[in-house]
Amino acid sequence: MTECTKTLCPYCGVGCGLEVSPPARPGGKATHRDSQGNPIWQVRGDRTHPSSQGMVCVKGATVSESLDKDRLKYPMWRDSLNQPFRRISWDDALNRIVDRIQTIRRHRGPDAICMYGSGQFQTEDYYVAQKLMKGCLGTNNFDANSRLCMSSAVAGYLQSFGSDGPPCCYDDLELTDCAVLVGTNAAECHPIAFNRLRKHHKRNPHVKMIVVDPRRTATAEAADLHLAIRPGTDIDLFNGIAHLLLRWGYFDTAFIDECTNGFSKYTSLLPHYSPDRVAQHCGIGVGDLETAARYWGEAKRVLSLWSMGMNQSSEGTAKVSTLINLHLMTGMVGKPGAGPFSLTGQPNAMGGREAGGLSHLLPGYRSVKNPQHRAEVEQAWGVPRGQISPQPGRDVWRMITGLEQGEVELLWIAATNPAVSMPDLQRTKAALRQSPFTVYQDAYYPTETTEYAHLLLPAAQWGEKTGTMTNSERVVTLCSKFRDPLWDARADWAIFAEVGRRLGFVEQFNFASSAEVHAEFVRLTRDRPCDMSGMSHDRLRHGPMQWPYTQADAENPDAKAYTTGKRLYTDWRFHTPDGRAHFVAYPSKGLAEPPDPNYPFVLTIGRLYGHWHTQTRTGRIEKTAKMYPNPFLEIHPRDAEKLGIADGDWAEVRSRRGSIRVPASVTKNIAPGTVFVPMHWGALWADNAEANALTHPEACPSSLQPELKACAVQILKV
Ligand code: SF4
């Protein structure tokens, strides 16, 4: 490969390093072409990347096939949704946005303006969007699709440790004695991180792997113990394990006394979680519950890993904190091979959290509710005191209800596809149809969401702009541009900055490059838990770096010491006011919509190997699209027999909100009473197969993350 550029895979939060080279051999012809005849850029794993060490999965290996296909080429406009789009200039497009923003600010105030962004953004995109919305317009109505993905992990870390920030690193995957994977099909959804754990597990017979999941996934297949609990019983399970750890004396008195608060209140809850009661409630055997507690109690290093199965819940924050309780009880945090470790969904959801990319956050893990935090950011941004609202803005579901109620007059969506990924899709789409003005900024056309837009803005692909992304282990990688944007596409941060300048904030958005944006952002992280004030684009050109990375660290000649392998809380001091971690005593409530005689099954939705979210990329790549070409319903043979459904028969899945029709896959991989549908198929890829037509928006009160993972459904043979 020649003219190789180092960058990052733009799919999942594992954050594998890539090397990308042009399609043509030196002096030769293009090697491969995609189905539309475009030459395909060459991609391989970057062996020098500390997080992935040269490994990539099928998505990373084929990603360049999605670079050119079905690109949104120009800004496009239409007055109403039933008209065709027509091409307009960037100048015209930007003026339309600016005019509308000014009109709305005058007549309704800034809170009638909303932006919905994405974990696909680079950190620089996120940061400039925060400055535009929260600093200059004075509304906190910026939310990202991380709300649907990781916000319960954010709130759980904050509740237990006093700050967001996963405390572990990938080296822990190879140092642990006991890995507990909860609500995560990492073998399919975070394959490279899982491979590291799997190899360690295979090589070391003493290492135990426990998987908690209602489905027998590829991840569960690899485990020593699979706990197929009923959906919504995670907290019962964790409290049941704690009950046994306490009974058997597996707790770390010194750590609990010196480093935590709330243990006695927590233990007063545990007598209610006797093994018999928990096993019955969770639908597992008492012996399996005891085995899980024994594996945890006997291990010197316990690592827990989780993703959407925990987070997408109406008690997601409590689930996260209740799992962390087990780590606190046994002193399993801040040491090699041990700790709670959320696996991030999107490639840069972590960077979004650092840049303040949710409606209650400000850059540097600050909160809009904290007056000192607001003052610090206002000063850094050069805006008047009091400019940043103390009220958290609308989370994305409240943007949808705001459209319904006529309270939102401008919705700006970027790099995400809510017409597939939001809960209760029929209601979501009806609300989007009511929007007086929707801007949709994306690299692709069409997507399911373009149908609901008035103005389309072509965004640069990930390889057409330079910026940073942070992966699940807090490693920041510079994603260097390897080609110019196609057609009229522009970088997201540059679009936001141009709107800011046209609104009169010339000084605030006087950025000549994304490196300048990054420099301003990292200054705002100084002395914060996510301190990366020693980083810069120039330094990151020499290789990825893990935070915290302070200015003092930047002077350390051993730069390699900061590439990976660092943990948080190694001194057992936490970010709470008293420096202690908090036990959270939470009695489980269960599902927001439990099954009943009319809707007797629990539907859980999930992801498949080779596919990515709403298929905006992977659906356009021949190899990945073929891996699972069609949607399906997984149903247990006992349930299928009762309903007269044979393998391959079409089934209708109905909830209180909608219905879909998909072929049945009759399998013992799913527990009786629970059914599974993958979430990847929107209207563009299959008829009447949208899993989110069935889901509901009931959310965790702390994280506001909807319970996308479970709703009550009925099944009918078609
Ligand atoms: Fe990309 Fe994730 Fe696969 Fe790594 S594991 S190559 S980041 S999709």
Image (tube, grey):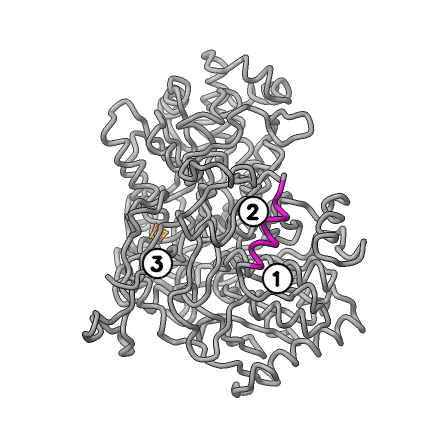
| Residue 382 x %, y % | 74, 58
Do we see residue 619 in this rendering?
yes
Do we see residue 600 in this rendering?
no
Query: Which segment is the magenta one?
Result: 516-526
Helix, strand or loop at disc 1? helix
Residue at image location 42% in from the left, 72% down from the top: 484
Residue receiving disc 2: 151
Residue receiving disc 3: 611
Helix, strand or loop at disc 3? loop
Looking at the rendered structure, the number of numbered marks drawn on it comes to 3
| Residue 272 x %, y % | 56, 22
Q: CA distance from mark 2 to mark 3?
A: 22 Å
User: In the image, is residue 338 part of the stretch drawn in magenta?
Assistant: no
Q: CA distance from mark 2 to mark 1?
A: 19 Å
| Residue 553 x %, y % | 52, 37
Badge nearest the viewer, 2 or 1: 1
Tell me the kind of residue under disc 1. Answer: Ala
Residue at image location 49% in from the left, 48% down from the top: 597
